[in-house]
Image (spheres, grey):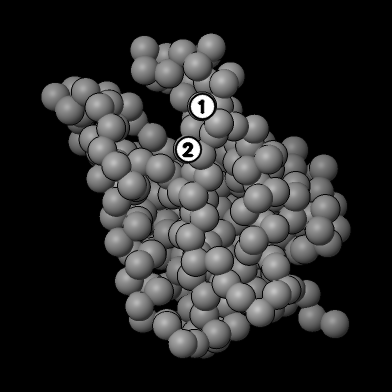
Amino acid sequence: MEKKIIIITGGANGLGYELVEEAIKNNLFVCNIDRDSQKMTLLAEKFKGNYMGFIGDISDEEFVKETVEQISTIGEISVLINNAGEPSFKMPKDYSKIDIDKCFKGLEGMILFSTEVLKVKEEKNLKIVNIMSSAALRGNKQEAVYCATKWGEKGYTESLKAAYKGTSVKVIGVYPGGINTNFYKNSRDYVSEEKQNSFMDPKDVACIILSNVMSEKNLTVADIIIERNA
């Protein structure tokens, strides 16, 4: 039987890692994309069998094309989860081009991976899951560029839905609030460790996402908004 493959970008750490682990527990073959070579080496050793890792930059067009082409020879790509992204939490006057470029890599990768997977799948029998943030739903004080990226990702997601309405390509937008990961490690003036520890457990969030995405019921959950309890 041909392998049913789920591609997860940014799966070496945080929510992405929990998505990888949960997918493997559910007997899915996971292709994990991340640039953290050290962590990816460890994961390749840990997840033997239903796992393959690809180390590279999601905003590198040639890397994305080659990776998707290689994955398509392994089995059938059934789900693409665009999860990778980096934040930059600063006041608007403090941003530099480095911050802007870093934030926009997530949007670039989302578009590039979606484009290439749609090509190899011939635009059928596919779920595209774009994990964004509650920052795609509102503006936040120290997240101007990050919000701009996430609003762009939401616009891309809604456009994909419009383009493939009525087809077997299903597009799901995911908007989680604060998650307790190292996402905020370089922004302690904005999110303290104490505050971070009150955020959602990434394993819980991963379970909610995958339970909706992989449902066998005759329905599609179009949007998933996940907020922590006050």
Residue 177 numbered mark, or none: 2
**The N terminus appears in which quarter of the rendering?**
bottom right
Q: Amino acid at mark 2?
A: Gly
Image location of residue 131, percent across then percent down: 49, 52
Residue drawn 74% across the image and 42% down it: 43
Residue 43 falls left or right of residue 77: right
Of residues 141 and 55, the one nearer the viewer is: 141
Residue 40 falls left or right of residue 225: right
Placement of 1 over or under 148, stated as above or below: below
Mark 2 against mark 1, which lies toward the viewer? 1
Q: CA distance from mark 2 to mark 1?
A: 11 Å
Image location of residue 150, percent across then percent down: 34, 48
Residue drawn 73% across the image and 74% down it: 216
Residue drawn 27% across the image and 26% down it: 142
Residue 230 numbered mark, or none: 1
Dot 1: few (<14), some (14–19), or many (≥20) neighbours within 10 Å? Answer: few
Residue 143 numbered mark, or none: none
